[in-house]
Amino acid sequence: MAEEEGNVNEEDVFLAFAQHPSPPRGPVRWFLDKVFFTFLMLTLLLLMLEAICRLLWLLPWEQFGDWLLGTPWKEEELEL
C-alpha cells in the first residue's frame, strides 16, 4: 500500500485542503452561530454562578454576620 501512495508527505495532504479559502457563510448560518454562541455563554455563566453559590453556601456566615454589620464585639463598646 505504501508503494501506491508515492511521494506524498503528510504536509502535502494538509496543504491540499488549505489551497482554497472557505466559502462565506450565509446569513442563516451566521445567525445560528450567534444564537449557539449566546446559548453557550449563558449556559457557562449559569454553571459558574451555581458553583459560586454552592461554595459560598458552605461558609460559616454566622461568624461573618457581626463583622459585616459592624456590630461591636464587647459591651464596653456599646457605652457612650
Image: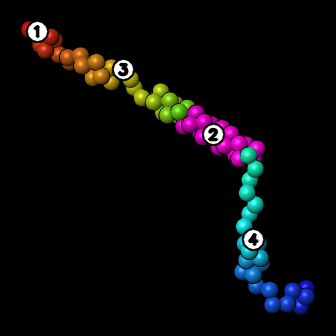
Q: Nearer the viewer, mark 4 or mark 3?
A: 4
Question: Is 14 on the left or on the right of 47, as rendered?
Answer: right
- Residue named by callout 1: 79
- Per the image, label 3 sits on a secondary structure element best described as helix
> Label 3: how many residues lie within 10 Å, few (<14), some (14-19) or many (20+)?
few
Looking at the rendered structure, the kind of residue marked 1 is Glu
Scheme of image coloration: rainbow
Please, what is the dominant secondary structure of the magenta stretch? helix
- Residue named by callout 4: 20
Label 4, label 3: how far apart the Cα atoms are: 65 Å
> Label 4: how many residues lie within 10 Å, few (<14), some (14-19) or many (20+)?
few
- Residue named by callout 2: 38
Task: Determine the image quadrant of residue 21.
Answer: bottom right
Looking at the rendered structure, the kind of residue marked 4 is His
First in sequence, mark 1 or 4: give its number. Answer: 4
> Label 1: how many residues lie within 10 Å, few (<14), some (14-19) or many (20+)?
few
First in sequence, mark 3 or 1: give its number. Answer: 3
Looking at the rendered structure, the kind of residue marked 2 is Thr
Task: Determine the image quadrant of residue 18.
Answer: bottom right
Q: Are marks 1 and 4 in contact (CB under 8 Å)?
A: no
Question: Is 55 on the left or on the right of 60, as rendered?
Answer: right
- Residue named by callout 3: 62
Residue 15: where, in percent of width, then height? 73, 77
Residue 54: where, in percent of width, then height? 52, 31
Q: Residue at x 15, y 10 (%)?
A: 78
Write down the region rendered in magenta: 28-48
The answer, for residue 53, to whether it is visible in the render is yes
Residue 37: where, in percent of width, then height? 65, 43
Label 3, label 2: how far apart the Cα atoms are: 38 Å
Does residue 15 sit above or below 5 in this rendering? Answer: above
